[in-house]
Image (cartoon, rainbow, N blue to C red):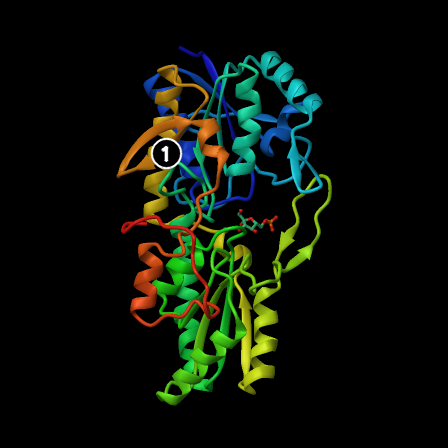
Amino acid sequence: MYKQIGVVTGGGDAPGLNAVIRAVVRTAVGEFGMKVIGIEDSFEGLLGETQTMKLTTKAVSGLLPRGGTVLGTRNSGSFCEFVDGKVTFPEGSINGALENLKNLEIEALIVIGGDGTLAIAQEFSKRGFPIVGVPKTIDNDLAATELTFGFMTALDIATEALDRLHTTAASHDRVMILEVMGRHTGWIALHAGLAGSADVILIPEIPFSFESMIQKINKREKSGSRFTNIVVAEGAREVGKSEFYQDAGSSQSAPRLGGIGDYIRQKIEEMTGKESRCVVLGHLQRGGSPNAFDRMLGTSFGACAVRALNEGEIGKMVALQANTIITVPLAEAVANIKTVAADGQLVRTARDIGISFATPKGFKSSVSNGLLT
Ligand code: F6P
């Protein structure tokens, strides 16, 4: 159907991006006889003197285990403006990129990204340019797909970090705090907390109180466990307070979270007198080789995205639902983010086995997502 398509990676990198690129190229070239052009540095490569690379099957050889993205990426730039907490998409950049896509003879785009990148892709789609999106983010917060690629690798890394902190916490009788990524949602913290045996999990969806956290630490002390492991999502907040930011952002970039872990460390030391340490896992969660699951999911997403494009399913995003890759409207995929249900099954399981969310007394969740959330 298309002679030549483009592929672009946007937003923060995630393990598995190269696996998707490889699958896109192998499917487009091998199965459908298309040519593929890689756009460099997210949509920025489509502005001015365009930055692109020809992607042949040979060019993507050996990419499956490689971390990062060979195309480069940006999570700020000319395609988004942040004004008073609202995001707008500068008309000039979109139109300039559309003009260059025409000049480059790129007839359709596979866009691999999270909510921000896919919202930009949606602007291209609204103007009639054929797009298929691929959901990427270690945060796993994209609506319409049960999983994004990158999440499972980040989860492995966070779980290993908790395992390692466990032994040092126990040796020193300390409180150890692991701050993990998760801007608006606590998927990494919740899953890693369960898999890595945290005693306290703090996520943006459930505001916490220090009173409740200290109660948990004291209860453990009384029962003979003189150490406590806490995992906190960077976007978690104390009840009645706002998130912690490292910088306020600008008109071109979103505010950057960070600092909650160290704040908790200080407060715990003050309130309990117990020695406490904080580790910020940061970009270690995003860098390096994808695990087997993310290689497999990225490959499936990439191949299905090209197939969808070839079948004329444009303005869509590939998504994983009930173990099958389907397509959903891009507009639906970017309309909302997927949050952890405060009374969902995983949270309940964690509570059942004695993990605390440091929930303040009387906190009631208004969300109910049923048994299998
Ligand atoms: O959305 C992915 C993510 O890793 C967030 O969890 C985190 O807040 C953000 O990106 C960090 O971005 P940067 O690479 O700009 O520090």
Residue at the location (46% across, 48% down)? Answer: 138
**Spot occupied by residue 98 in the image (x, y as percentages of width and height):** 61, 17
Quarter-of-image position of residue 160: bottom left
**Closest to the observer: 37 or 168?**
168
Residue at x 26% of width, y 38% of height: 322
Q: Is residue 264 or residue 335 the one in the foreground?
A: 335
> Could you say where residue 179 lies in the image, as x and y percent from the top left?
52, 64
Mark 1 vs ligand 1: CB below 8 Å:
no
Query: With respect to residue 275, does 246 lie above or below?
Result: above
Amino acid at the residue labelled 1: Ala
Residue 9 visible to an observer of this rendering? no
Please tell me which residue is depicted at 54% across the width and 27% down the height of the picture. 121
List x then y, in percent, for residue 36.
47, 21
Q: Residue at x 70, y 48 (%)?
A: 249
Q: Which residue is mark 1?
A: 319
Camera-side residue: 101 or 369? 369
- Considering the numbered disc 1 on the image, is that residue within a helix, a strand or a loop? strand
Q: Is residue 166 above or below residue 320?
A: below
Q: How many numbered discs, if any?
A: 1
Q: Position of residue 270 (x, y in %)?
A: 61, 83
Decide: is 259 above or below 57. below
Question: Where is the N terminus found, in terms of image quarters?
Answer: top left
Q: In the figure, 83 relative to 139: above or below?
A: above
